[in-house]
Image (cartoon, grey):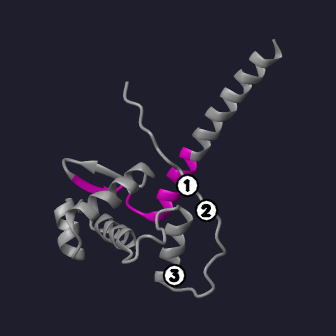
Amino acid sequence: MLIRRQKITIIRHRLPVKKNLNEELQWFGNSLGLFNLRDKDKSCFRIFIELIKSAKKNNPLTSDEIADKLGLSRGTVIHHINKLIEAGIVITDRNKYMLRVDNLETLVEEIKKDVVRTVDDLRQVAEDIDKWLEL
């Protein structure tokens, strides 16, 4: 049985004051814990944007294609792709990478389902522990 490990991070930030695409994409990714201050050249953000564009075209990309398009090393791309996979945002298919779904609204709904499943599991285990402690 394959157990997929997923790290779900939700960070509550104040909504962007300026309503523009770049600000909202940054807020979106930051709220999912995807981008951090150590990523000085915003590599993860740029990879995320490239994957959004490829999802709109239904065109999965290899790590080499992403690296070439963005002027990044393949190692940098793989590092950030692995983070996006761990977050449940990106999937692989025959050495190509794509968003889990073809649009961000559906992605949020999928993440919501992941969170609900995780909370349900936590509740069940908590109930079991409470029963054992009552003995």
Residue behind mark 3: 23
**Which residue type does callout 1 highlight?**
Thr
Q: At numbered mark 2, what does the secondary structure look like: helix, strand or loop?
A: loop
Among numbered discs 3 and 1, the one appearing first in the sequence:
1
- In percent of width and height, residue 24 lies at 52, 77
Residue behind mark 2: 11
**Magenta segment includes 101:** yes
Among numbered discs 3 and 2, the one appearing first in the sequence:
2
On screen, residue 61 above or below 125: below
Instruction: Name the foreground residue: 66 vs 80.
Output: 80
Q: Is residue 135 left or right of residue 109?
A: right
Disc marking residue 59? none
User: Mark 2 and 1 residues: CB-CB less than 8 Å, in contact?
Assistant: yes
**Which residue type does callout 3 highlight?**
Glu
Give the position of the C terminus as an image quadrant. Answer: top right
- In percent of width and height, residue 26 lies at 49, 75
Mark in the foreground, 3 or 2: 2
Measured in 3D between alpha carbons, the distance from the residue under mark 3 to the one under mark 1, in whole angstroms, is 19 Å
Q: Is residue 100 something that shows in the picture?
A: no
Rate crowding at label 2 as few (under 14), some (14 to 19) or many (20 or more) other CA atoms within 10 Å: few
Instruction: Tell me which segment is drawn in magenta.
Output: 96-114
Q: Is residue 26 something that shows in the picture?
A: yes
Image point 48% across, 72% down: which residue? 37
Image point 44% across, 39% down: which residue? 5
On screen, residue 25 above or below 81: below
Q: Is residue 133 left or right of residue 51?
A: right
Name the quadrant containing residue 41.
Answer: bottom left
Name the quadrant containing residue 83.
Answer: bottom left
